């Protein structure tokens, strides 16, 4: 099976080149660095022991930042390479590590044998760490050939993913047994890793519990001034159809509070124009903002059109709906990470489909931090009941989250340091 996979990736390579060039034209790739994904690169001078972390996008890179910072601080001769796939993840790296000399970011090459083989030889890591569900067979087998230890960190193997891999059971066992250790993100993922033939499996908890302390950015004065005399709530990380749901919630709340203002931060900001069309069709007044803008008095809905700004809104709004949780079609892959909102003391509402973060939501539910809603009337009622209460959830609950995260952090770092 592996032979056929190798042949398939070689056949697809020219089409992948066309795809990446097309994405560059559409603004979905780094204009200056997109070639890192599809062509051989010059060898860079980056001396010292090197650990390679590979992530997919924003969520995964955010989850490893505290670990990476710790390793750099406590291992003076250590260098770190982070590869990722998305443009947005590259921007997160720039924000976090601009002044750090011992770390570098590259875009992950497409999983074609001769590209990944060249990449591994040039960087020669002492350890390769794949985060979440990033499984690239050619790369994994080349690392194994070179006797480089491989870790699957915060492994997320859903039931749906597991069933697909089990259709190719021998191939799956060959891949998952190649990892020296798999650190699962949930009990469910741990069980699925066993089914797929992984050998050394550990479970400490989801890395997303780990706190990444940094200066809390405040909303711009122009926005705070605009919010005066308005009742404000936030819908975060929304997906298609959820924006319309939230607009209808807004309409119901407006019947009671004429000064209601709904903030929508879509998960994918390239959809803001599409969302604005829906807002207009619902006879509501929308406004797209980036930063330092004043909100018009008759605005009903504001759309956030920038990366990395959610925490400012979590800090201001204490009633938050978290998206990717209402669409039944996503029953096996629904949910967005609610930990950051909880850490800012927000009261969290979500739909019934939160499979990807089921254990986290169960923990927050136990602590009375999050509540499940299933329809427009339920969410409207919750917002109306709590809209005048902008107090944070109890600090003791926040300390419990941080303590849980600290335990996960300590166990994970200890395991990684065994390979250094």
Image: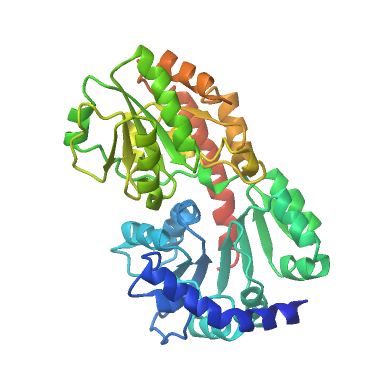
In the image, taking residue 277 as reference, residue 178 lies left or right, namely right
Q: At which x and y percent is residue 217?
A: 27, 41
Question: What residue is shown at x 62% (from left), y 43% (from top)?
Answer: 330
In the image, 112 versus 260, the foreground residue is 260
What's the colour scheme? rainbow
Q: At which x and y percent is residue 85?
A: 48, 65
In the image, taking residue 408 as reference, residue 171 lies left or right, namely right
Question: What residue is shown at x 80% (from left), y 56% (from top)?
Answer: 195
In the image, taking residue 204 as reference, residue 313 lies left or right, namely left
Q: Quadrant of residue 13?
A: bottom right
Q: Is residue 236 above or below residue 413?
A: above
Number of marks in picture: 0
Question: What residue is shown at x 25% (from left), y 37% (from top)?
Answer: 218
Q: Quadrant of the C terminus?
A: bottom right
Q: Quadrant of the N terminus?
A: bottom right
Q: Quadrant of residue 43?
A: bottom left
In the image, 420 versus 142, the foreground residue is 142
Would residue 102 be seen by someone viewing this image from the given angle? Answer: no
Q: Is residue 262 above or below residue 63?
A: above
Would residue 90 be seen by someone viewing this image from the given angle? Answer: yes
Q: At which x and y percent is residue 170?
A: 82, 69
Question: What residue is shown at x 53% (from left), y 41% (from top)?
Answer: 324
In the image, 246 versus 205, the foreground residue is 246
């Amino acid at each position: 099976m592996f032979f056929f996979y190798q042949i398939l990736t070689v056949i697809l390579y020219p089409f992948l080149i066309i795809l990446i060039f097309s994405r560059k034209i559409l603004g979905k790739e780094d204009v200056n660095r997109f070639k890192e994904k599809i062509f051989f690169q010059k060898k860079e001078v980056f001396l010292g022991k090197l650990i390679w972390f590979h992530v997919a996008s924003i969520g995964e890179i955010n989850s490893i930042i505290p670990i990476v910072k710790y390793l750099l601080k406590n291992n003076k001769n250590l260098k770190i390479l982070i590869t990722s796939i998305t443009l947005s993840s590259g921007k997160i790296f720039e924000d976090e590590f601009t002044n750090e000399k011992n770390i570098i970011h590259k875009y992950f090459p497409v999983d074609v044998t001769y590209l990944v083989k060249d990449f591994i030889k040039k960087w020669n890591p002492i350890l390769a760490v794949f985060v979440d569900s990033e499984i690239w067979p050619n790369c994994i087998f080349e690392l194994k050939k070179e006797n480089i230890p491989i870790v699957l960190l915060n492994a997320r193997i859903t039931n749906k993913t597991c069933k697909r891999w089990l259709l190719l059971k021998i191939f799956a066992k060959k891949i998952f047994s190649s990892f020296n250790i798999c650190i699962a993100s949930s009990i469910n993922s741990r069980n699925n890793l066993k089914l797929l033939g992984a050998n050394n499996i550990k479970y400490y908890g989801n890395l997303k519990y780990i706190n990444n302390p940094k200066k809390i950015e405040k909303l711009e004065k122009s926005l705070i001034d605009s919010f005066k005399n308005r009742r404000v709530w936030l819908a975060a990380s929304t997906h298609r159809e959820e924006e319309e749901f939230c607009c209808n919630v807004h309409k119901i709340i407006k019947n009671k509070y004429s000064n209601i203002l709904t903030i929508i931060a879509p998960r994918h900001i390239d959809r803001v124009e599409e969302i604005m069309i829906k807002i207009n069709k619902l006879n509501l007044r929308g406004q797209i903002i980036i930063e330092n803008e004043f909100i018009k008095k008759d605005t009903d809905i504001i759309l956030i059109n920038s990366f990395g700004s959610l925490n400012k809104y979590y800090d201001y709004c204490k009633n938050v709906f978290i998206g990717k949780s209402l669409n039944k079609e996503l029953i096996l892959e629904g949910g967005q990470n609610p930990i950051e909102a909880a850490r800012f003391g927000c009261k969290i509402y979500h739909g019934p489909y939160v499979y990807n973060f089921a254990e986290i939501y169960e923990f927050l539910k136990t602590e009375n931090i999050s509540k499940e809603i299933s329809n427009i009337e339920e969410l409207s009622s919750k917002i109306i009941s709590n809209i005048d209460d902008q107090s944070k959830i109890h600090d003791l609950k926040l300390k419990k989250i941080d303590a849980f995260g600290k335990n996960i952090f300590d166990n994970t770092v200890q395991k990684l340091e065994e390979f250094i």
